[in-house]
Amino acid sequence: MRGLAALPQQQPSYFDAAYYYVDGVNLAEGRGFEEDFVWNYLNQPGPPPQPSHLYWMPLTSMLAALGMLIGGVSYRAAQIPFVVLSALLAPITYVIAYVLSGQRWSSWLAGLFALFSGFYLPYWPAIDNFTPFAVFGSMALLLTGMENEAWRMKNKEWRPETGDKEA
């Protein structure tokens, strides 16, 4: 599913994705964390090259560079880590829903909603923060929540028509 969502994307389609991709190319080609362009004027930049990621966090470019180290310097190769990570969203969502509710049917439903995510589907394989934040944020919430059993719903406490816990 995620691989199919990646196919129409031949290049970055907006500023953020372009920034992460170009800096991923620089990393993959061994130039390190540098911008060979003027990205913005927030810090009154000098002439290029400048240090990169003074405004944005570097993880996304590092993931793109990892894909390019595996598959060569191309946009399609840069998408590899994002396609793989986004494929984990449905099983992660299933696990979170199951741990939360203890009900398989609602867990499957949640996993299917994550798999067929409508509006967000084209953003999952994009070279941007959507996928890393979704995956790592979901895992952080799950692991943090597992420390406290009070957040879990027991099967008889959950009201599917409202989604609320009974008092």
Image (cartoon, rainbow, N blue to C red):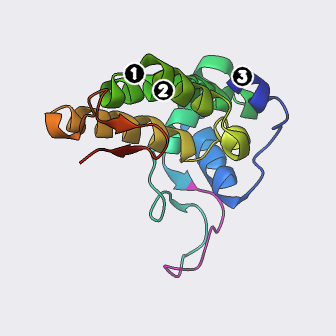
Q: Name the residue under label 3.
A: 1
Badge number at residue 106: 2
Mark 3 lies on a secondary structure that is loop
Question: Pointers 2 and 1 in contact (CB under 8 A)?
Answer: yes
Give the residue type that dot 2 points to: Ser
- Identify the residue shown where x is 50% and y is 20%: 105
Residue displayed at 65% across by 32% down: 78
Q: How many numbered marks have been drawn onto this rendered protein structure?
A: 3
Residue at (56%, 46%) from the top-left corner?
130
**Magenta includes 139?**
no
Quarter of the figure with residue 1:
top right
Q: Which mark is residue 103?
A: 1
- The image shows residue 104, relative to residue 152, as above or below, that is above
| SS assignment at label 1 | loop
Q: In this view, does 110 lie above or below 19?
A: above
The range drawn in magenta is 35-44
Marks 2/1: CA–CA distance: 6 Å
Going by the image, does 144 lie left or right of 96? left
**Label 2, residues with CA under 10 Å away: few <14, some 14-19, many ≥20:** some
Of the pair 104 and 58, the residue shown nearer to us: 104
Residue 40 or 27: which is nearer the viewer? 40
